[in-house]
Image (cartoon, rainbow, N blue to C red):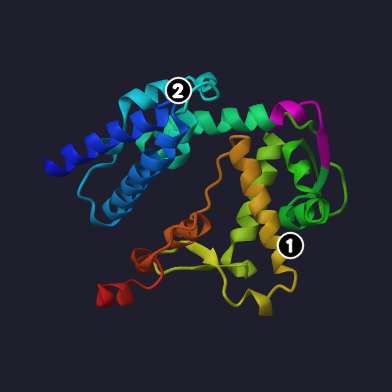
Amino acid sequence: SELRFILHNLLRVSISFWWDKNPKLKKVHAIPVSSCLRTLFNYNDRLKFLKTNEWLSKDIDAASARVEELEDTSTFDVVSQTPFILSNLTRQKIFLQLIYDRFNSRYYFDSFPIAVVRGEELQSAFEHLSNKDSSVFFKRFRVSYRGIDNHQEDGIDGGGLYKEFMNSALKQACDPARGLFSLTEDHKLFPNPEVRAIEPEFPAYYRLIGMLLGKAIGSGVLVDIPFSRFFLAKILNRSNLNYLQFLFPNMHRNLM
């Protein structure tokens, strides 16, 4: 109960500082309080002393749900500094709306054709996209399939072929048998430390995978790629000793 009281007060203080019009107040007070909240949240991720829904702020969640307010208030500051105080649904709405406002509206009428060989989606993606500028990934992919015999399949891409291509390419890329990723003991994916000996062009493949994942997220395509938590924390530059349990659980237990 004491922790809940402290947390709820920190949430209110943090939000009030971010919404204050004084930029000095934000710099001096809002950032340290938000940093404290993030530290508590990371501890809670390991120790589970509070439930996930107890971190949510109903006031900020309701305000953030109206994405048009982001440019006029400091809600965006709160979202970027302490995203865990918002529900997953609200965060998704905000993210997709920002992607659309900044990029999709600019490339809405642009498309990029991709001829895909069925069963070889990753290789087709590599041939078409690995040497392309990142701006290509903001365009709408116009996918067409052909068989191994080079016969063009019938059908117009109304979104279904694109989703099939994205899912297949990413699953092939993350298949441990491909060599780009390895599995932890709980069958989660992380980059293979021995990839240099398996795939000479691994930097280009990793870049492509990252671009495809970003494209999938930005276009709302659901892909089932079970990355390990320590790998995701590393991407976010939030890795610490606690995440060792997801790679070497026995070593983590002995150290802790």
- Residue 238: % across, % down: 44, 57
Report whether residue 153 is seen: no
The residue beneath circle 1 is 204
Does 94 appear above or below 126? above
Packing grade of label 1 (10 A; few <14, some 14-19, many >=20) is some
Residue 198: image location, x then y, percent: 68, 76
Say which amino acid is labelled 1: Ala
- Is the Cβ of the residue at disc 1 closer than 8 Å to that at disc 2? no
Q: Which residues are drawn in magenta?
A: 103-113
Q: Amino acid at mark 2?
A: Ala
Lateral position of residue 59 relative to residue 9, left or right = right
Compared across the picture, whether 194 is left or right of 119 comes to: left
| Residue where numbered disc 2 is placed | 65
Quarter of the view holding residue 123 = bottom right
Q: Nearer the viewer, residue 250 or 80?
A: 80
The reply to whether the magenta stretch includes residue 109 is yes
**Count of numbered circles in the view:** 2
Q: Neighbour class for label 2 at 10 Å: few (<14), some, many (≥20)?
A: some
Against 173, residue 212 (above or below) is above
Return the residue nearer the eye: 201 or 35. Answer: 35
